[in-house]
Image (spheres, helix red, strand yellow):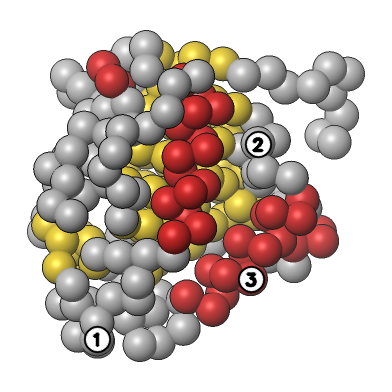
Amino acid sequence: MHGELFPRERAETAPGAVHLPDWLDPTAQAALVEDCRRWARPPAGLRTVRTPGGTMTARQFCLGLHWYPYGYARTAVDGDGAPVKPMPPALDALAREAVLAAYGTPAGPEPYDIALVNFYDADARMGMHRDADEHSDAPVVSLSLGDSCVFRFGTAASRGRPYRDVELRSGDLFVFGGPARHAYHGVTRILPDTAPPELGLTGRLNITLRVSGTA
């Protein structure tokens, strides 16, 4: 409960960027954690990502299409080379439900065909970046599981100010589209030992659902 007297409320972090606290109930969270444990196993499982700027501290696996710096492939080209696991239709349905909840209007006709799943331990971070490798401007859907984090959301102009820091907790939904679709964002820190105990998860899982625009 985190000691709040009043429930956390929906908030617009920036035009087009919507935070819906506690969107996933405990049962849905637990089911997604178990799904992620299964999907993260080899082949094409959890890996360390190396970019031209260095090694990411958050580890990652993908569904539907495999992200690598800076594009997509159907095999884990910077991992074990195995074919990427398919995108589950249930995640496409969940993304569409999320867009409707955030904006009050349905998602477009293109399928949500990519899931990037990042695992953060207590020391992991994610530098400010834009999700700009897709051929679609469909909103990005972000789901948080496990430990809370400080999520920094800026503008499309630069990695610097102005930005806002938002605490994302297990079960929270964050959707960004429209004028916020290409905004810089990152994770500045993880808040250890904040995960719901019933998840049995140490660390944070972030499921990011996207439309490739190539389907």
Secondary structure found at label 3:
helix
Q: State the quadrant of the C terminus.
A: bottom left
Q: State the quadrant of the N terminus.
A: top right
Do we see residue 184 in this rendering?
no
Q: Position of residue 38 (x, y in %)?
A: 54, 78
Q: Amino acid at mark 1?
A: Ala
**Contact, CB < 8 Å: mark 3 with mark 1?**
no
- Residue at 57% in and 70% down: 35
Q: Amino acid at mark 3?
A: Glu
Instruction: Determine which residue is flagged by label 2.
Output: 23
Q: Number of labelled discs?
A: 3
Instruction: Determine which residue is flagged by label 1.
Output: 82
Secondary structure found at label 2:
loop
- Label 1 crowding class (10 Å Cα cut-off): few <14, some 14-19, many 20+? some
Tell me the distance, in whole angstroms, between the alpha carbons under discs 1 and 2: 34 Å
Q: Position of residue 29 (x, y in %)?
A: 68, 54
- Residue at 45% in and 31% down: 99
State which quadrant residue 46 falls in.
Answer: bottom left
